[in-house]
Amino acid sequence: MARTASLSGFPEWLPQERLVELHVLDSLRRTFELHGFSSIETRAVETVEQLLRKGEIDKEVYGLSRLQEDEGEGGKPDPHALALHFDLTVPFARYVVENAGYLAFPFRRYQIQKVWRGERPQEGRAREFTQADIDVVGDGELPFRYDVEIALVIAEALSALPIPDFRLRINNRKLAEGFYRGIGLTDTAGVLRSIDKLEKIGPEKVAELLKTELGATEEQAAAALQLAAIRTEDTSFVKQVRDLGVSDELLEEGLHELEQVIEAAVQHAPGKVIADLSIARGLDYYTGTVVETVLVGHEQLGSICSGGRYDALASKGNRKFPGVGLSIGVTRLVSRILSQELATASRSVPTAVLVALTNDESWPAAQDVAAQLRSRGIATEVAAKAEKFGKQIKFADRRGIPFVWFTDDDGKHQVKDIRSGEQVDADPGSWSPAEEDLHVRVITA
Amino acid sequence: MARTASLSGFPEWLPQERLVELHVLDSLRRTFELHGFSSIETRAVETVEQLLRKGEIDKEVYGLSRLQEDEGEGGKPDPHALALHFDLTVPFARYVVENAGYLAFPFRRYQIQKVWRGERPQEGRAREFTQADIDVVGDGELPFRYDVEIALVIAEALSALPIPDFRLRINNRKLAEGFYRGIGLTDTAGVLRSIDKLEKIGPEKVAELLKTELGATEEQAAAALQLAAIRTEDTSFVKQVRDLGVSDELLEEGLHELEQVIEAAVQHAPGKVIADLSIARGLDYYTGTVVETVLVGHEQLGSICSGGRYDALASKGNRKFPGVGLSIGVTRLVSRILSQELATASRSVPTAVLVALTNDESWPAAQDVAAQLRSRGIATEVAAKAEKFGKQIKFADRRGIPFVWFTDDDGKHQVKDIRSGEQVDADPGSWSPAEEDLHVRVITA
């Protein structure tokens, strides 16, 4: 499919492509619900005030105005003005605060919706795209165990998709910040921002940044980079960090947390999770676990699932709602599946059977045959015109419908598999196609 | 639920309410797919130019602007500017034109998405709401039979929902316009606009409008109102119209078309469809069949499903794409179901089983039990803390989870139905809850 979107950054799928996307969405929903996550949706718009809550917006936001409205006064944006949400975390935080009295905590929710960012479109980035988020949020406190669980749920959810192998790369902000503090670098946020650039600009330039912008010594910069170089598939990272000889209370806490995540992953999601101490997630406001995810062999696509722990996802007066969550970039994944034909739909329409018309008067009887088939879950269409059978078969073929049903004037029924040409007697009250033809399947290449 | 939306006109559901909405959406999708309709989605935004395509917008449209962008020049709206779609018909028409080379016609699609209108919110009207549309669109021509079929599909789709009884009220523009022409009223669009006000202002005032605004005589006004008064559950409307003694070719064509729809409905959707010759659908650009739908006993809610036939849903040069389709107001229906408690979810979370922890070290073993249950489709959560069993049971109860699983130190498994208190030995490799407890069900009041 070499089509390009008619509006740059706003991808739209053809029906057979949409079947792949639906398969991905259904699969995610199934995994999330099997793990007890409740579905919610929030409105597409938030007030500008709400979106500015964190003090800055590093995302490009689309504001709304009513076309028929009188011109505004111009100047500053009205904080009560509306804008499209750019992620599902900010709206979820608002939803939790507004509905706290109606929710049972820890509250587990999944949310699959479109979000909008007015960015310059490029590979892997769209202006409208679908995210699938899961979060667990507590009232006052949230056991660390949920950090472990969320990683396992996502590993299971991604494993069920028609995508290449993946790796969750997990780090912990406490570990990193404690380490930087332990080596005497106090602007830990600044160090994280520099480390975040590691993959883009390489270790030499990061060392330069640390020295020139943060006043780090040669040794401090080297130690920070040594930490970021640690990457293990098991809990051996703990020893590697200890061997760097830094001691700090927060570092110990972070080490213990990350160890629990990796330990559980080795047991319950073997091969899918690594401890990767270079993961920083620069500008985001995480306070513990941080996660990015790469598709093996598609690393340049960027992270397909990111997130982590917030000590205060939301707050209401003195009441804090800590949360941990991850967000899957559904559109990024589906775009890649489609562009590389990693998976395709077994047919292009839901229809399994076309009921042909012998003559124009047989339409009501054909509807009855169709109703009997549908009552057993067999997707069925009725031809609209009593054209020659050859033409009706060609119509089914063109639409990708595998079976055509014929009823002769004596009421004798036959069904033809138009792929093999095989035609057999059939009873509309009992015939079913083979299991693999009943529904559209999505087949991994 | 006496909650009001925190932003007027933008309803949001609690998790247990969302379960009802999901049930409605799943049910619609199932019916549409059983009838061979393909899912598509279009982007949320269109160019203002596209939305103005029909020459006027009678809907309140939300325009988009990038918050971080420099101020525009003001004045007229830029036709290439973006705005949120206000229905799914305009975007679908664009999609058909853009992708005509990739689609097999007649193209059957369903589309379930949110739309936005900047209207003043009131009962039954929101600013953000979900529509579920089905359309069949042809390339050049589209047999009338699809008008009949679409009505039957919608009757089946609505019958499967947890809503009160409903009536599709169907008319035909050709019938009405031919009749007006036949009695000498040539501004047929004007007459339709006046007739459209019948339910709001009553027949006397409509007669006044016809006389003062359209120059109708007393007799012409009376005849137009006589036509609009005809309402039958079978094809007897044909004789009633003929008895009015008007003859016109277009009238005959419309009579024949509407007769086919009602005839098929009497047979395949008995009691759900009526011929209602007052249905006009004022400003919309239909050219044949027109449909509105009322919930019996909830008539003041307005139409919950409307649509009809367009001779040219879209066009591309000389190429015309006629279509016929109907649009269900999902949010309007779900709001009513929730506010009147017409249906409720059997529990508030997807989870069927909570695996309790005997001690803190049993978490990995509890994960294994949960994985075994999930492999058989049983939604399962694991407790995060080894609190006293009473507390863990209370946690399940508060979340609405019906079963709690216990594993003692010797590896003996038991499962407790916390509603009845019954506790039995169970094997995580084979135990299943009763069918009615496996998934959340939506129960009609």
Image (tube, coloured by chain):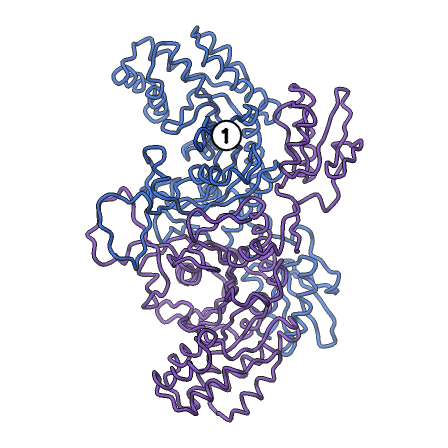
Chain colours: A purple, B blue
Rendered location of residue A220, percent (x, y): 42, 90
Q: Residue furthest bottom?
A: A245
Rendered location of residue A241, percent (x, y): 54, 87
Q: Amino acid at mark 1?
A: Val
Rendered location of residue B292, percent (x, y): 46, 29
Of residues B212 and A359, which is closer to you in this image?
A359
Of residues B90 and B265, which is closer to you in this image?
B90
Q: Residues within 10 Å of mark 1 (few under 14, many from 20)?
A: many
Rendered location of residue B283, percent (x, y): 36, 28
> In the picture, which quadrant includes the C terminus of chain A?
bottom right
A12 relative to B388 in the view: left or right: left
Of residues A64 and B154, which is closer to you in this image?
A64
B411 relative to B231 in the view: left or right: right
The local secondary structure at tag 1 comes to strand
Residue tagged 1: B324
Which subunit holds the residue at mark 1?
A: B
Residue at x-position 50% and y-position 82%: A228
